[in-house]
Amino acid sequence: MASPPLHTADQVRLGDGFVLDPGAYELRRGDRALKLERIPMELLLLLVEERGHLVSRDRIIERVWGKDVFLDTDNSINAAIRKIRHVLKDDAEQPRFVQTVTGRGYRFIGPVTDLGAASTEQHSVGEPAGDPRERIHRSTSRVALTLTVLGLAAVASLWLVRSVGPRPGGVPTLRSIVVLPLDNLSGDPSQDYFVDGMTDALTTDLAKIGALRVTSRTSAMRYKGTKKTTPEIARELNVDGIVEGSVVRSGERVRITAQLIHAGSDQHLWAETYERDLGDVLRLQSEVAQAIAQQVRVQLTPQQQARLRSSAAVNPEAYEAYLRGLPYINGQAGFETAKGYFEESIRKDPGFAPAHVRLADTYVVLGLSRQVSPERAYGSARDAVRRAMELDGSVGEAHTTLAVLRWFHEWDWAGAEREFGRSAELAPYYAFAHGYHSNFLAWGGHAAEAAAEMARARELDPGLSFASCETANFFQLRDWTRLVEVSRKWVVSDPNDWLERHFLAIGLEGLGRASEAIPEYQKAAEMSKGDQDPVAGLAHALAAVGRKTEAEAVLRDLQRSSKHVYSSPYLIAAIHAGLGSKDQAFESLERAFQEHSWDIAWQIKADPRIDTLRSDPRFQSLLRRVGLSP
């Protein structure tokens, strides 16, 4: 027998057996909860709330995303509407639920029946239970009340634990929050890594509660030591609430003091201090997140409650090594250093799942940057991520890593899409997952969906540059004009970004302007200290303008270096293609196929440098063996 529905008074039936439960933030059909991500769910709640009325695109943006958020309007709204129609099995041409009013917006036209007969709300005799739209609006506001908290402001006596309740009048509605960098009050600057790691972990715990938007750590870290006021920060990050606080570490004891502030009024809503042994720090963090959820009355789903309660004890030395590795993997270099710290963490505590996930991520990056061979990167990353999932199946970030491995090494496109979907379910807050998924969608030719995912990544992490993800999308779509336009913009913004110069050069080659591409390849190769991609691109462009002697010299250098470090046979094939040496090009492509070169999955569909090979039957045979052609 199915369990009784939650908050029956707030539920409405939409027809065809669909039940919308705003209180549980859930759409069901029969006994089965249907998958609907946050943005489509928010949009569906709005449409049903305004049923029968036209809801404009401007109204949708203001309600679902906020007025000032960066958004690719058409693509993002269209993608959300498609997901709503998919789950409701609705037809855009003959709609039963959501009607498109071209150029204006959308209207919910399906039946809406109030299921409030079992309501526990008190009404006067003869008083109607209320319009379902009003119920949905009230429930949506409750769901959006945020749960955040963790910043910390220190306390005078060392291990005093105190709690301050919310002010009279209740907590203002919060739909989005940011955890500002916690203050290090240990009196030891060498503990900054520990405090920054606590900020990251607390942000992640809060983001597991899907009823509100939590700004990522990378965006929040811009405000470390800032003199800006709370309202200023809130306006810049487009959030309603701010968590401030501090960390004090004394030996093997940790104390966190957190306070939640309503950004608009600068009103302090809640504050509390917690202390634990270092080995219980994960439980401490989850306790704070749960306490905040209770304070702002955010309703947690059973799955969210389970994820927060799943935090276990961790070896203190393992946790320290893990925190020391995070800055290196979050930066632009130092991945070998990060790998060493995560390996140390695993040695100290083999059961600590996050260290296994991050170790897998370091191997993915090392493989993508060709610092290790595809075989070594794949084998090590696969083993680490599988172990992480055995230890904790709720770690959504692990599914993102697995999706990348499915895509780049296993050539399992359907499997990659499933893993991206699973990651979005378990870790909807993970901006990098949306960035990778955006690239995957562009690789598959789905331009609108890719743009929507990119907008979601920026919404989650407005302070993080997704420049390379955006330009990579235009590369995958072979939109050379837009690739040149966007990459040139980013080069102007950051002249030291070698990857954007590389994409600019590829776009110029795609447009047949190889002579203009050469100086950009040269700068990219120099700034990257000899990354193989711009080096190979330079050789190809030199050959394209008739400077074959110089191109052959670059090729010989790459071939010599392959005796000492890993060199991509795919890139060597691209140079041979530029020189017109088709037989040698296909020999190198065959080696790339045999070793499952990650360049095949990433580049072979779009790369203009191998266009001269595409008409050859050998190329078509390669595509079939890879699974890219029937």
Image: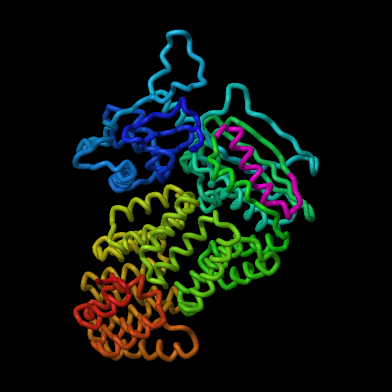
475 horizontally vs 561: left or right: left
Please tell me which residue lies in front, 172 or 514. 172
67 horizontally vs 286: left or right: left
Which residue is drawn at the image coordinates 58% and 57% (left, top)? Answer: 392
Residue 113's spot in the image, x, y percent? 35, 26
Please tell me which residue lies in front, 450 or 557. 450
Residue 268's spot in the image, x, y percent? 61, 32
Queried whether the magenta region covers residue 284, the answer comes back as yes
Way the structure is coloured: rainbow
Which residue is drawn at the image coordinates 43% and 8% (left, top)? Answer: 126
Residue 203's spot in the image, x, y percent? 57, 48
* 170 vs 176: above or below: above
Which residue is drawn at the image coordinates 71% and 40% (left, top)? Answer: 273
Residue 146's spot in the image, x, y percent? 53, 36
Please tell me which residue lies in front, 158 or 339. 339
- Stretch of the chain drawn in magenta: 275-298
Which residue is drawn at the image coordinates 55% and 70% (left, top)? Answer: 383
* 80 vs 605: above or below: above
Q: What quarter of the picture does the C terminus occupy?
A: bottom left
Whether residue 346 is visible: yes
Q: In the rendered image, which quarter is residue 108 located in?
A: top left
Whether residue 180 is visible: no
Residue with the most extreme front position: 1
* 166 vs 375: above or below: above
